[in-house]
Amino acid sequence: MTTNDWGSIYKEMGAKPVVNATGSVTLLGGSTPVAEVKAAMDAADSAYIPLIELEQVAGDRIAEMLGVPAAYITSGAGSALTLATAAFMAGTDDAKIEQLPDTTGMPNEILIQKRQRYWYDRCLELAGAKLVEYGDENGTTEDDLRNAITDRTAAVHQVMYEQNPVDPNVLTLEQVIAITHAAGKPVSVDAAGQIYPLENFGKYVKMGADFQCIAAKYMGAPHSTGFALGTKEVIDAISRHSFVGYETRRIRGVGRPHKIDRQEIMGVVAAVQRWMTLNHEDRLSTAEGQSQAILKPLQGIPGITAELNTNIMGHQPFGVFITVDPDVVGFTVDDLVDKLRDGDPSIWTRVQDGRLVIHVFGLGEGQAELVGNAIAKIVKG
Ligand SMILES: *Cc1c(COP(=O)(O)O)cnc(C)c1O
């Protein structure tokens, strides 16, 4: 630890701070705003401003930086997903905006490939929509989608994880866009972490999707922020369903609880600006260096293999994969997670597909070495 007061504000209240070797996860507080973002948020304190105007100019600025038609800042990517479904169901009709989450008389089904069901798809239902699966656990055909689209369809949703190996058994976004648009329906994309390489940032809207979300938690903005990118039509509708629409237009939409403050709006603009002009080579090489620092004390220890995660796409580059041979070390990889969590300081990690998957996103200065040494000590016994 480089500072004496690591986590002291939490300790003073009797709460235990942890070392975050999991990465950008909401259960640990997700992200730490970068200096440029904090400066913008501080500067925003000095004056009040009508949020309907601020949302407009901030959205315009982000849209211009990314080269997409329109953008809207929300309280997280999850909020953008909910507001987008509201927009797909009720559009800009004020009576319908006020009727949600009762969807009587509106198209209210969001189609999703069975194999693409995921943790955040619940956000697609919160404005009153229903998720309807198409395809099955083995895969999806183009006819599955053609047959699934009906008058009740509000939108077809696709999730993009370009850092993962492509699932050959799902329809591609190109296929989904072509078939869905031919049927006159809009396409929604969750691209929360698709911010690097920069050509992927906003890419799906450029490919023809009507909407995509981005999680600003992944780019040094406040953890509670995100934004929608999309066509002018969809973004205009999202703004009408938002908390700003509720307060300014006096139209009581479902977006009212999805509130953000003017400081956060300016923080997101600063985060996007920084991201578009950042030296990403430096960012990547720092993450690789931290990953190597974790690996160093783990070489040549019997019973574990530790290797570099070489992915640089998306929001969390590099990291470390660790496998444990219980016959040699006497405990499983899940036991290792528990032992790290129970240590002092408490180190949080997680297991995916039988491996410990470490990300350096949430590690402070000196913490990479600490994590590597803690693992080495536990495994050596
Ligand atoms: C984090 C995440 C979300 C939710 O974003 P919030 O900004 O936390 O609401 C949605 N989808 C994916 C793929 C994510 O990684």
Image (tube, rainbow, N blue to C red):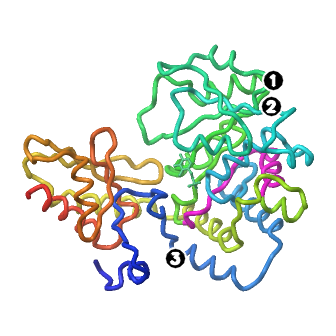
Dot 3 falls on a residue whose secondary structure is helix
Q: Is residue 318 left or right of residue 276?
A: left
21 in relation to 205, above or below: below
Q: Which amino acid, by three-letter code, is at mark 2?
A: Pro
Q: CB of mark 2 within 8 Å of CB of mark 1? A: yes
Does the magenta portion include 197? no
What residue is shown with label 2? 107
Residue 256: x %, y % from top left: 77, 59
Mark 3 and mark 1: Cα distance apart in space: 49 Å
Q: Secondary structure at mark 1?
A: loop
Which of the pair 138/327 is nearer the observer? 327
**Percent from the top left, x then y, of residue 355?**
27, 43
Within 10 Å of the Cα at label 2, are there few (<14), some (14-19), or many (20+) other Cα atoms? some
Query: Which tag is nearer the camera, tag 3 or tag 1?
Result: 1
User: Quick one: label 3 or label 1, which is nearer the N terminus?
Assistant: 3
- Type of residue at label 1? Asp
Q: Residue furthest front?
A: 14
Q: Residues within 10 Å of mark 1 (few under 14, many from 20)?
A: few
Q: Which residue is mark 1?
A: 151
Instruction: Please report contact status of discs 2 and 3: CB closer than 8 Å, yes or no.
Output: no
Q: Which mark is residue 35?
A: 3
Placement of 99 over or under 58, stated as above or below: above
Residue 12 percent across, percent down from the top left? 40, 84
Residue at 69% from the left image edge and 45% from the top image edge:
126
For label 2, the SS is: loop
Q: Amino acid at mark 3?
A: Ala
- The residue under the point 42% across, 38% down is 164
**Mark 2 and mark 1: span between their CA atoms?**
7 Å
- Report how far apart the C-alphas of labels 2 and 3 lie in the structure: 44 Å
Could you tell me which residue is drawn at 84 percent across and 60 percent down? 246
Neighbour tally class for label 3: few under 14, some 14-19, many 20 plus, Cα within 10 Å: few
Q: Does label 2 or label 3 sit earlier along the sequence?
A: 3
